[in-house]
Image: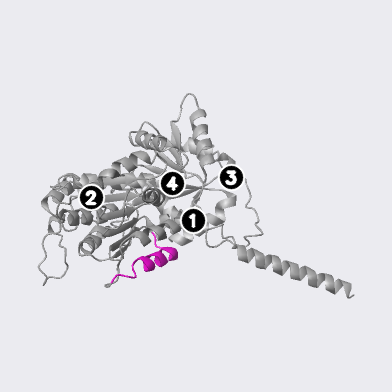
Amino acid sequence: MGMPFTTLKASADPSHASPALFCQPLLRAIDEKGYSSPTPIQAAAIPALLAGRDVLATAQTGSGKTAAFVLPLLQRFSDLPVRAIRTPVALILVPTRELAVQVGQTLTDFAKYLPQRVKIAVVFGGVSINPQMMHLRGGADVVVATPGRLIDLIDHNALSLAQVKTLVLDEADKLLDLGFADELARITALLPVKRQNALFSATFPPALEALAAGMMSQSASGPLRINIQSEPETAPDITQRAIAVDAPRRTQLLRHLIQTEKWQRVLVFVATKHAAEIVADKLRKANKKHPISAEPFHGELSQGKRSQVLMDFKARAVQVVVATDVAARGLDISALPVVVNYDLPRSALEYTHRIGRTGRAGLSGVAISFVSAATAAHFKLIEKRHGIKLALEQVAGFEPVEVTPVNAADPQGTGGVKGKRPSKKDKLRAAAGEDAAATNALTSLSNK
């Protein structure tokens, strides 16, 4: 058990007189949320953020990263004088609508007892921009946004970023994965040069290092690097399994496992929105005597539909949600027992985020990956990247008969993991080499 929030200090230097980290209204909200003591990422990041340091924080999914930046924001806001005109003093950028809603709710929960009302604006695409513009007419103190919608609002002169003092990028690596690099560059160019920056992510790939270097180059003290490694006592209790199955029989196997293992709720990850629709439909129609309530979840659904699916899933009105990777980040489904990789993630890093939807808040969970002959090499790379080795199980009645194909473009069996596949330049070089070889061969024959 770590130190309680009430004794956490804003300075680790014993010679520096430092008050308790949080004001009483925040402590009341923290206690009401059931937070007895800070997690490792919170204990490391909160004092640094309150002291005004830039922070680059890496920690496992479900480690409490949201509270690690929300609480310092609210504490610093409570110290500000009452402002007649509300302009954003904090901007939190997130990759998905669902994460935006979740962060906004966390802010609201913790701010409820502060004497000065905090106006929080949560804005994202996929819905009409007009209600969001109306909400911003009275200003806002904290804005939680997806990058594309934020730029739309700026273009409509609905808000200004000129007074932002703190920028937070939550799930920063996913922001880059989803192609938001150009939007991030435009947004940061509109922010004051002198500001506090915080990047929180479960992984920290090279592209994110470059982004951080550009964002934080103005910081005099330099950013504080925080890397919280999973330890046995803090790592999620997730049992990982791999099941060999022929690709055409995955839906049948999924239905069999749901029924025989009596899963009450399961989140199933697929590669495309089309697959999400098809698999969910097949699960619903497969057995009239024992119907399975299943719904698809992907980025092309309306925001209303996505919100309804999540609400029903949390309320246990829906048993199975078949989702693309839009659900791999930020969704916090309490007591979710099972995650299934129907399709393996394209990136080995995304495996962490997918299975991290289960085994949260100290509960145990199960993560199962379906492995076909065509994806066996890819799964081996996922195992290698994560330092794991899983026994490849077989389920009676679903024993695979497919043979691993020989892929001429992937002779070393990289499995198509991002970063390992031949680049466009590699393919052009290979083609040029083949053309040269053919020319040499023809010249040799003509000289004979």
Residue 209: x, y in percent? 40, 66
Q: Quick one: SS at disc 2?
A: loop
Measure how far apart labels 1 and 3 are at the Cα level: 25 Å
The type of residue carrying mark 3 is: Pro
Comparing labels 1 and 4, the label whose residue is closer to the camera: 4
Comparing labels 1 and 2, the label whose residue is closer to the camera: 2
Q: Residue furthest bottom?
A: 447
CB under 8 Å between callouts 1 and 2?
no
Measure how far apart labels 1 and 4 are at the Cα level: 14 Å
Residue 256: x, y in percent? 49, 35
Measure how far apart labels 1 and 2 are at the Cα level: 41 Å
Q: Quadrant of the C terminus?
A: bottom right
Whether residue 270 is visible to the viewer of this picture, yes or no, is yes
The type of residue carrying mark 1 is: Ser
Measure how far apart labels 4 and 3 are at the Cα level: 30 Å
Q: Quick one: SS at disc 3?
A: loop
Q: Which residue is mark 3?
A: 400
In front: 81, or 394? 81
Residue 347, label in figure = 1
Name the residue rendered at 11%, 65% in the picture: 18
Q: Which residue is mark 2?
A: 86
Q: Quick one: SS at disc 1?
A: loop
